Image (tube, rainbow, N blue to C red):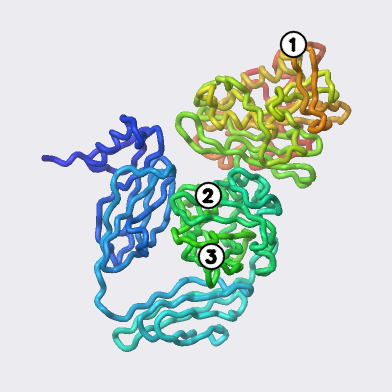
């Protein structure tokens, strides 16, 4: 009987042949109901059982087939097994790096939901003949003058440590069995090699540790997170106060977190190491199947490859896997030295050097499964350019580019906040950026919304939610944003000319709800719900039959109907304040002929005098290359400028036409912002109506 082998492609997207039994399993997953239905996440092992290969680590690879996030587990749980990476998302591979000799363990994966699909594999490792054993960790040590700088020796014999460079100071120089070597001094900017040899004669074994003390780490980190000084004893996914990120790389950052609490008590880092912020800190729990903390989308300096990451921690290195990624999918572990003993706050510093520059970085903390009485606490995460150390290949040879639609960060960030929202598309489930905003917390209005526009964003149709999901932006306080969502169970909150009325302004989307697919209108997709957050809403003329609303609605329809292309349309929608003479009040609403206001929440809001829309795309629409790699002749850009008024150019119902078009450069001069910073200046000077069908 011939073995059935199927190469899956299309929507399932498996890039390798799948065995007959597993193919049948996947076909059942794709067509049947039940707990393992493909309507939910599944993750399963594709590889067969195998014998641990002592000499070729690549032969200890285990392939995973999944449509969601997954976490590795093994049975028995008490077995000393080490896998890397310990988790992932989608189809992937992990390696069994270590396991007990003379034992067999079953290794499997759980989906993000905690469920399993398919069977685990059995990995067997032969027993060693009795002889000298030696293990030294870490293999690379970045010397930290404020840290412990410990090297762990594991052996069953007597050992000696030596270094040809007398400037390296360490102790002890010898020992028997397991031990710890402490490095007390390394010359700045120098690389030293420490050799540890166990046993004698032909049975002797040696291992080396490369030790370096960096002299060129920048004092000013481009990303920091100290968890603030807000509420303690709260779950991180239900609280926003801890998101205190700062630095040039922080404006686009988002977080993925599960099973993590924020504490603010006397057990924090205060006074425990140099630069400790104290105050609030993070606590991860020990369940490796359910616990993780990911910092996503840290913008990196252009062309930089050397970095230094530091953080305070109470856990030992074996308690937590520290990994980095360029895309949030393929992870590479970092070797680091943490607390010398559990529950001792220690400043940890790890240097790494990327094989190739990337545009953004993800950092993930995930427990290995060691249960600790007080959790796995950490604080004061800092990422700086410079230093470098262990070599890391993030699997890309392409220098990462900034998002083409993203304006340059304003030089003056006073009263401004920038944040990016991410969500999954309705049908293809692509997790991608939704939009980035710059919000004015004094005027209580968005200044601009930058968003990519592509067919995938409108999966799920133009349907508006059955009930508009107006909501507070969780990244800002109530005082910082205009209240336009229901308060205390009251009616819909709007904007009025005075706290008591009359109601003259409507909640105007800068990024239209129709630009993001809704799916089930009774249970709208998150990608659509995010357009109803206060950060995306500005005070616009309320009457849809008047001039501004006529033009704004016509522009929204035209852009999606005519300008969206395979290469993506890059858009910025913004508000401009020529003066601050028109003021309104938030948190007010209308019920019949009666107007109300919750005065205790209401505050003055400045009404924009003008609105604008900016567009950038390739001329052909199908070049299939980044905007940054296009010549000026391959690109086209334009701006549209509208007055926020009932009568425009003498008409209450003007027609959208060339007279409302201006160059991007002209709008830059008016607003002071720099738009589409990666394209040639001549592109931003364009204003050719025929390029856009006028």
Instruction: Check if mark 1's residue and mark 2's residue have beta carbons within 8 Å.
Output: no
Locate residue 227 relative to residue 11 in the image: left or right. Answer: right
Crowding at mark 2 (Cα within 10 Å: few <14, some 14-19, many 20+): some
Q: Nearer the viewer, residue 290 or 135?
A: 290
Residue position marked by numbered label 2 in the rendering? 259
Residue position marked by numbered label 3 in the rendering? 315
Locate residue 665 relative to residue 532 in the image: left or right. Answer: right
Seen in the picture, residue 300 relative to 693 is either above or below; the reply is below
Q: Secondary structure at mark 1?
A: loop
Q: Earlier in the sequence, mark 1 or mark 2?
A: 2
Give the CA separation, mark 3 to mark 1.
Answer: 66 Å
Q: Secondary structure at mark 2?
A: loop
Give the label, 1 or 2, closer to the camera: 2
Asked whether the viewer can see residue 569, the reply is: yes
Q: Nearer the viewer, residue 518 or 352?
A: 518
Q: Earlier in the sequence, mark 3 or mark 2?
A: 2
Give the CA separation, mark 1 to mark 2.
Answer: 54 Å
Q: Residue at x 56, y 59 (%)?
A: 305
Res 216 label: none
Residue position marked by numbered label 1 in the rendering? 653
Q: Residue at x 46, y 75 (%)?
A: 152
Q: Quadrant of residue 135?
A: bottom left
Give the label, 3 or 1, closer to the camera: 3
Asked whether the viewer can see residue 224, the reply is: no
Instruction: Check if mark 3's residue and mark 2's residue have beta carbons within 8 Å.
Output: no
Query: Can you give x and y, in whole percent of width and height, for residue 37 in the image?
Result: 35, 34
Q: Earlier in the sequence, mark 3 or mark 1?
A: 3
- The quadrant of the picture occupied by the N terminus is top left
Query: Can you give x and y, in whole percent of width and height, for residue 556 in the image?
Result: 64, 21
Q: Residue at x 55, y 69 (%)?
A: 339
Give the CA separation, mark 3 to mark 2.
Answer: 17 Å
Q: Secondary structure at mark 3?
A: loop
């Amino acid at each position: 009987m011939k073995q059935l082998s199927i190469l899956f492609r299309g929507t399932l997207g498996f890039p390798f042949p799948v065995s007959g039994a597993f193919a049948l399993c996947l076909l059942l997953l794709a067509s049947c109901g039940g707990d393992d239905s493909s309507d939910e996440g599944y993750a399963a092992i594709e590889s067969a059982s195998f014998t641990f290969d002592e000499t070729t680590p690549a032969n200890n690879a285990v392939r995973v087939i999944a449509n969601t996030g997954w976490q590795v587990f093994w049975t028995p749980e008490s077995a000393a097994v080490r896998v890397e990476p310990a988790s992932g998302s989608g189809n992937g591979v992990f390696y069994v790096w270590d396991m007990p000799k003379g034992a067999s363990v079953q290794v499997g994966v759980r989906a993000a939901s905690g469920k399993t699909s398919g069977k685990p594999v059995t990995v067997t490792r032969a027993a060693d003949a009795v002889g000298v054993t030696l293990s030294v960790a870490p293999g690379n040590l970045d010397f930290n003058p404020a840290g412990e700088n410990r090297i762990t020796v594991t052996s069953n014999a007597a050992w000696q440590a030596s270094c040809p460079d007398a400037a390296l100071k360490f102790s002890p120089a010898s020992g028997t069995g397991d031990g710890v070597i402490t490095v007390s001094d390394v010359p700045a900017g120098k690389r030293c090699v420490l050799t540890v040899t166990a046993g004698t004669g032909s049975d002797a074994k040696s291992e080396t540790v490369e030790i370096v003390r960096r002299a060129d780490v920048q004092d000013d980190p481009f990303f920091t997170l100290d968890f603030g000084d807000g509420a303690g004893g709260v779950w991180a996914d239900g609280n926003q106060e801890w998101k205190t990120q700062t630095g040039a790389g922080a404006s686009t950052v988002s977080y993925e977190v599960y099973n993590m609490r924020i504490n603010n008590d006397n057990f924090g880092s205060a006074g425990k190491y140099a630069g400790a912020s104290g105050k609030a800190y993070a606590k991860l729990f020990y369940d490796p199947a359910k616990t993780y903390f990911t910092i996503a989308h840290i913008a990196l300096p252009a062309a930089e490859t050397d970095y230094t990451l530091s953080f305070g921690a109470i856990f030992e290195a074996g308690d937590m896997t520290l990994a980095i990624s360029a895309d949030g999918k393929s992870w590479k572990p970092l070797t680091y030295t943490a607390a010398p003993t559990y529950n001792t706050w220690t400043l940890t510093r790890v240097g790494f050097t990327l094989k190739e520059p990337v545009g953004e970085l993800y950092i993930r903390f995930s427990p290995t499964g060691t249960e600790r009485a007080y959790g796995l606490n950490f604080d004061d995460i800092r990422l700086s350019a410079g230093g470098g150390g262990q070599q890391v290949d993030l699997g890309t040879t392409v220098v990462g580019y900034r998002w083409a639609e993203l304006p340059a960060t304003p030089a003056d960030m006073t009263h401004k906040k920038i944040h990016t929202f991410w969500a999954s598309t309705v049908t293809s489930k692509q997790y991608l950026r939704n939009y980035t905003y710059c919000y004015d917390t004094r005027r209580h209005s968005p200044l601009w919304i930058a968003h990519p526009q592509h067919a995938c964003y409108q999966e799920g149709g133009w349907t508006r939610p059955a009930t508009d999901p107006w909501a507070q932006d969780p990244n800002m306080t109530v005082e910082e944003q205009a209240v336009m969502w229901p308060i205390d169970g009251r009616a819909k909150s709007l904007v009025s000319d005075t706290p008591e009325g009359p109601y003259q302004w409507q909640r105007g989307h800068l990024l239209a709800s129709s630009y993001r697919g809704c799916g089930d209108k009774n249970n709208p997709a998150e990608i659509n719900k995010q357009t109803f957050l206060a950060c995306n809403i500005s005070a616009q003329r309320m009457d849809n039959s008047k001039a501004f609303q006529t033009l704004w609605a016509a522009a929204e329809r035209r852009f999606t109907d005519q300008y969206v292309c395979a290469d993506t349309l890059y858009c910025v929608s913004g508000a401009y304040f020529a003066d601050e003479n028109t003021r309104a009040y938030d948190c007010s609403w209308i019920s019949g002929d009666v107007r109300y206001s919750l005065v205790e929440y209401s505050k003055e809001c400045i009404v924009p005098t003008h609105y604008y829309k900016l567009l950038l795309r390739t001329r052909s629409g199908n070049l299939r290359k980044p905007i940054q790699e296009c010549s000026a002749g391959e690109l086209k850009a334009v701006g549209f400028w509208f007055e926020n008024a009932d009568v425009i150019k003498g008409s209450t119902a003007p027609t959208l036409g060339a007279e409302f078009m201006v160059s991007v450069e002209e709008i830059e001069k008016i607003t002071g912002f720099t738009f589409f910073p990666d394209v040639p200046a001549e592109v931003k000077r364009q204003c050719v109506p025929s390029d856009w069908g006028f």
